[in-house]
Amino acid sequence: RDFRSYQALLTMHIWFLHKRLLLDNEDPHRAGLIQEELFDIFWTDSSNRMRAHGVNELLINKNLKTVQQYTFMHLFHYDHCFSELLDSPKERLEELKNLVLTHILLINPDDQKALDLHDDHAECIAWYIETQYQNIVHDLPDPLYRKARIAWVDLPDFSNLKDANGKILEENPIDPEDILPKPWLRNIANDG
């Protein structure tokens, strides 16, 4: 339930949508307005999650600026991976793993033990990013995109992850609050 890791996961998925909106040649002005609204909703959600984490109301704007700084750094790292490294898939995958370790798993790059422990985890997420990028930016049919019906790929299977020595890691249980009863759906709303 770490704020920053959750923010990073949301950032990743918003970046996919952002990249698809940039490719909209049919109505670039409308796509720009949608992007602006998407980020406005994201910052409102970020502020609401800060409140839920107990941040004092007087410090919300100050903390939001900090959140925006590391969020934009995260977005720039994705841009780097899928622009400068587009023709180097192996190098891009390694850079994506570093991005995951830094922004999502919040691993200190000087902590070799933690890096070894989370290498398999980072690789699963890096492959998810590769797959999701291809899915949203290149493969999502235009009629679905125009109706905002995003067909996300399935999350990776995090069972039987191994550390750098090949030892299977202990599985982390899923928090019951993260599982919705069928047929419920989750939605973001400022009024709760």
Image: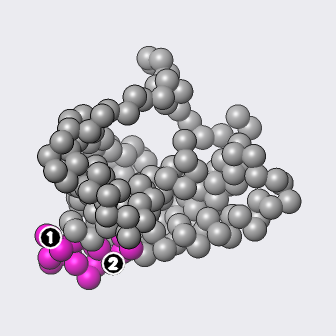
Q: Tell me, yes or no, if residue 130 can be seen here.
A: yes
Q: Residue at x 65, y 40 (%)?
A: 189
Which one is in front, 95 or 129? Answer: 95
Is the residue 52 above or below the residue 15 in the image? above
- Coordinates of residue 65 in the picture (x, y in percent): 68, 70
Q: Amino acid at mark 2?
A: His
Which one is in front, 143 or 21? Answer: 21
Disc 1 target residue: 89
Instruction: Point out the image quarter for the N terminus.
Output: top right
Extent of the magenta region: 77-92
Q: Tell me, yes or no, if residue 16 can be seen here.
A: no
Disc 2 target residue: 80
Q: Amino acid at mark 1?
A: Pro
Cα separation, mark 1 vs mark 2, equals: 13 Å
- Coordinates of residue 111 in the picture (x, y in percent): 37, 64
- Quarter-wise, where is residue 158 in the image? top left
> Which circle marks residue 36 in the picture?
none
Q: Residue at x 36, y 61 (%)?
A: 101
Check residue 86 for magenta coloring: yes
Secondary structure found at label 2:
helix
Check residue 75 for magenta coloring: no
- Lateral position of residue 13 relative to residue 133, left or right: right
**Mark 2: few, some, or many residues within 10 Å (few <14, many ≥20)?**
some
**Mark 1: few, some, or many residues within 10 Å (few <14, many ≥20)?**
few
- Coordinates of residue 18 in the picture (x, y in percent): 43, 64
- Lateral position of residue 107 relative to residue 67, left or right: left
Q: Residue at x 53, y 27 (%)?
A: 177
First of labels 1, 2 by sequence position: 2
Secondary structure found at label 1:
helix
